[in-house]
Image (tube, helix red, strand yellow):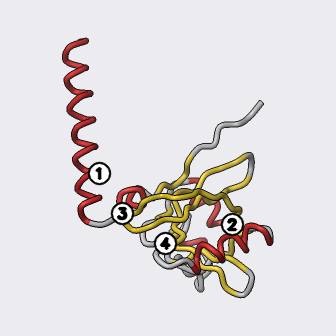
Amino acid sequence: MLEAMPTLVNNKKATFNYQVLDTFEAGIELFGYEVKSLRAGKGKLEGGHIVVRGGEAFLLGCTIQPYQASNTPKDYEPERARRLLLNRKELNELLGIESTKGLSLVPLSFYTKGRNIKLGFASVRGKKKADKRETIKERDTKRDIARIMKSQNG
């Protein structure tokens, strides 16, 4: 039986600010108190990105607040670089994406898969202002249609 993958933290701005081209999954190297913090939903992915340096991938710019501030080590840094666990083939693919002009790697969500915490991320291209307006218009139209349908059925 497959276990559901509950999302712990979501990057809501990513799909609005970027056009998602391809999605990936990676394990992430965390301390025990960071795992507890993520399970409590105390993470923030907005403004984060992924870089590949020296044959390893790192998550930068994401904040994981301490689970219990009094029990967290004094030198704990909430925005430290966290290593992603990927195999060589995946790293090479990410290197190719990162070197392509106009493309970035952006985190989408932290979720659980079995006992492990995974990071879902995507290769993205930035949206222009007109594309963002179009997204807002589309979202409002869907909301209006749903409201009308609800009033006719109810």
Mark identifier at residue 135: 1
Q: CA distance from mark 2 to mark 4?
A: 14 Å
Callout 2 secondary element? strand
Q: Which residue is mark 4?
A: 48
Check contact, mark 4 vs mark 3: CB within 8 A: no
Amino acid type for the residue under numbered disc 4: Gly
**Can you tell which of label 2 and label 3 is closer to the viewer?**
3
Q: Which is more toward the observer, 17 or 93?
A: 93
Quarter holding residue 147: top left
Q: Is residue 73 left or right of residue 43?
A: right
Describe the element under mark 4 as helix, strand or loop: loop
- Which callout, 2 or 3, points at the residue further toward the start of the chain? 3
Q: Give the label, 4 or 1, closer to the camera.
A: 1
Dot 2 corresponds to which residue?
A: 28
Q: Earlier in the sequence, mark 4 or mark 3?
A: 3
Residue pictured at 22% horizontal, 37% vertical: 141
- Indicate which disc, 1 or 2, sits on the residue closer to the N terminus: 2
Which amino acid, mark 3? Asn
Three-letter amino acid code of the residue under disc 1: Thr
Q: Residue at x 63, y 58 (%)?
A: 24
Mark drawn on residue 17: 3
